[in-house]
Image (cartoon, rainbow, N blue to C red):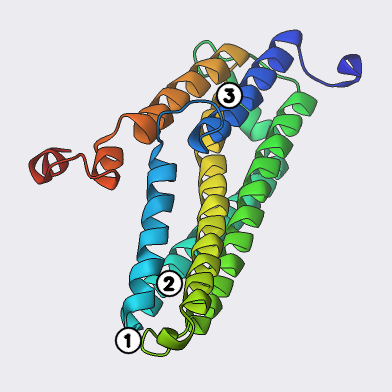
């Protein structure tokens, strides 16, 4: 199969490394590799706290406003992914011109037209994955809004507190699912930036992947945002960031 692909052995190794790092980061952020609490896990706890606070509010306009903001942000990224996909198809139509530009880049490998188009198709696949994640996240935030509306009012819950608790749990779980798919889409966008290194050479792909992984790892496990989410950060430190 490898012989039928317009790629070198170095390309295949770099691509496998890129995909492995992507998977490892997703597992680490989800708490499946290390016991250290990630920013994602910390924010999931805050999502649950938000839904519990919502359950005690009589007026929930602030909660619906937050949901609208989350949906708008998700829709923005979904639209951006679609625009980027369109740009990639335009890139395919200008393959010869782009290859001439790449040839002038220092240390850049000179790929065949078939190899270049294969890489562009890979970029399209990453962006399509991001679009579907954002699209599903948008839908889940919509479902979460419905579940928030279905949570009984606190004054009415005195007759059935179990129903209130169940409604809060449903809304919180749906919110976490929406956030998980949004994070997956955002991760795909980030890794699409690292993927651009492949258009230079396989070593550049490995380098950009490592740099991106280091940045994302810091944000998830060692950033001030994580400390703030866990209640460990100070206001002065946050402003300094």
Judging by the rendered image, the residue that carries numbered circle 2 is: 67
Under circle 1, the secondary element is loop
Can you see residue 145? no
Under circle 2, the secondary element is helix
For disc 2, the neighbor class at 10 Å (few under 14, some 14 to 19, many from 20) is: some
How far apart are labels 2 and 3 at the CA level?
32 Å
Judging depth in this view, the residue of 107 and 125 nearest the camera is 125
Measuring 34% from the left and 83% from the top, which residue is drawn there? 61
Measuring 38% from the left and 45% from the top, which residue is drawn there? 42
Judging by the rendered image, the residue that carries numbered circle 3 is: 21
Measuring 33% from the left and 77% from the top, which residue is drawn there? 56
Location of residue 118 in the rendering, given as x and y in whole percent from the top left corner: 76, 31
Location of residue 215 in the rendering, given as x and y in whole percent from the top left corner: 38, 28
Can you see residue 209? yes
Q: Is residue 221 above or below residue 136?
A: above
Q: Is residue 156 left or right of residue 192?
A: left
Q: Which mark is residue 58?
A: 1
Q: Which mark is residue 125?
A: none
Q: Earlier in the sequence, mark 2 or mark 3?
A: 3
Q: Nearer the viewer, mark 1 or mark 2?
A: 1
Q: Earlier in the sequence, mark 1 or mark 2?
A: 1
């Amino acid at each position: 199969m490898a012989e039928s692909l317009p790629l070198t052995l170095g390309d295949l190794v770099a691509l496998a490394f890129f995909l492995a790092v992507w998977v490892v980061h997703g597992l680490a952020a989800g708490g499946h590799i290390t016991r250290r609490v990630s920013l994602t896990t910390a924010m999931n706890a805050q999502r649950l706290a938000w839904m519990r606070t919502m359950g005690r509010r009589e007026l929930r306009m602030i909660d619906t406003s937050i949901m609208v903001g989350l949906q708008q942000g998700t829709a923005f990224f979904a639209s951006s992914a679609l625009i980027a996909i369109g740009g990639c198809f335009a890139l395919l139509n200008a393959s010869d011109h782009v290859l001439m530009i790449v040839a002038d880049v220092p240390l850049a490998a000179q790929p065949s037209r078939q190899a270049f188009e294969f890489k562009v198709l890979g970029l399209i696949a990453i962006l399509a994955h991001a679009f579907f994640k954002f699209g599903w996240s948008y839908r889940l935030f919509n479902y979460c809004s419905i579940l928030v509306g279905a949570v009984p009012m606190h004054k009415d819950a005195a007759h059935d507190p179990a129903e209130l608790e169940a409604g809060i749990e449903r809304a919180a779980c749906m919110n976490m699912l929406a956030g998980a798919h949004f994070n997956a889409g955002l991760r795909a966008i980030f890794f699409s930036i690292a993927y651009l290194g492949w258009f230079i050479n396989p070593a550049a792909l490995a380098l950009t992947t490592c740099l991106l992984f280091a940045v994302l790892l810091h944000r998830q496990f060692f950033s001030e945002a994580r400390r703030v989410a866990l209640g460990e950060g100070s206001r002065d430190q946050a402003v300094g960031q």
